[in-house]
């Protein structure tokens, strides 16, 4: 009987401990990380499956850049407007040809970093999206960038 009560108590406490751990991890993810260009390019992804980058050619983190025609500054501004319109997105750095956006995930509020770099020679905008904490993001950063690609292409076709 005593063992049964212990098992019931453990079963009740385990979800609570898991939720508290997720909230603590989310708060830890608010610690700023090193972002910005390195030798004129977006930084490579760490060796974890929670990052995607269009300037990297590894099988797990590679992503195609967004293409545009017309004025590069206008294209970059339009893309940044699309990113900034997302719920949870906050533009932290906006410079000529580079932007850093922090995206807070719904509910737990994990902070992910999104970076954009304008490549005027290739008529492309390079993308990087990375989680600050954890090992895997279950594909969340890739999904976010592919959703952005979809909105970008829809807007480009309409305009």
Image (cartoon, rainbow, N blue to C red):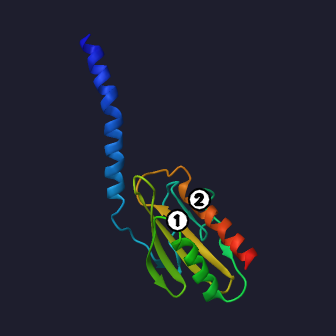
- The reply to whether the C-beta atoms of the residues labelled 1 and 2 are less than 8 Å apart is yes
Badge 2 marks a residue whose secondary structure is helix
Q: Earlier in the sequence, mark 1 or mark 2?
A: 1
Q: Is residue 105 above or below residue 53?
A: above
Does residue 64 show up?
no
Q: Can you say which quadrant of the picture contains the N terminus? A: top left
Q: How many numbered marks have been drawn onto this rendered protein structure? A: 2
**Where does the image place residue 136, in percent across and percent down from the top left?**
49, 50
| Residue corresponding to mark 2 | 142
Q: Quadrant of residue 8?
A: top left
Residue at x 51%, y 73% (from the top left corner) = 84
Q: Is residue 17 left or right of residue 86?
A: left
Q: Classify mark 1: helix, strand or loop.
A: strand
The disc placed on residue 93 is none
Return the residue at label 1.
129
Q: Nearer the viewer, residue 2 or 151?
A: 151
Residue 37 place in picture, x, y as percent: 48, 78
Residue 67 can be seen in this image: yes
Residue 62 versus residue 29: which sits nearer the camera?
29
């Amino acid at each position: 009987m005593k063992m049964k009560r212990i098992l019931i108590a453990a079963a009740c406490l385990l979800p609570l401990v898991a939720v508290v751990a997720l909230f603590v991890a989310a708060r830890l993810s608010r610690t700023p990380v090193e972002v910005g260009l390195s030798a004129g390019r977006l930084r490579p992804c760490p060796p974890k499956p929670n990052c995607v980058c269009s300037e990297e050619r590894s099988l797990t983190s590679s992503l195609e850049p967004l293409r545009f025609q017309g004025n590069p500054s206008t294209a970059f501004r339009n893309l940044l407007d699309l990113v900034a319109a997302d719920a949870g997105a906050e533009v932290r750095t906006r410079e000529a040809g580079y932007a850093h956006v922090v995206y807070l995930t719904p509910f737990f509020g994990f902070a992910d970093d999104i970076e954009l770099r304008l490549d005027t020679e290739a008529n492309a905008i390079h993308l990087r999206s990375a989680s600050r904490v954890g090992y895997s993001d279950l594909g969340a950063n890739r999904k976010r960038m592919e959703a952005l690609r979809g909105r970008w292409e829809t807007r480009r076709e309409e305009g």
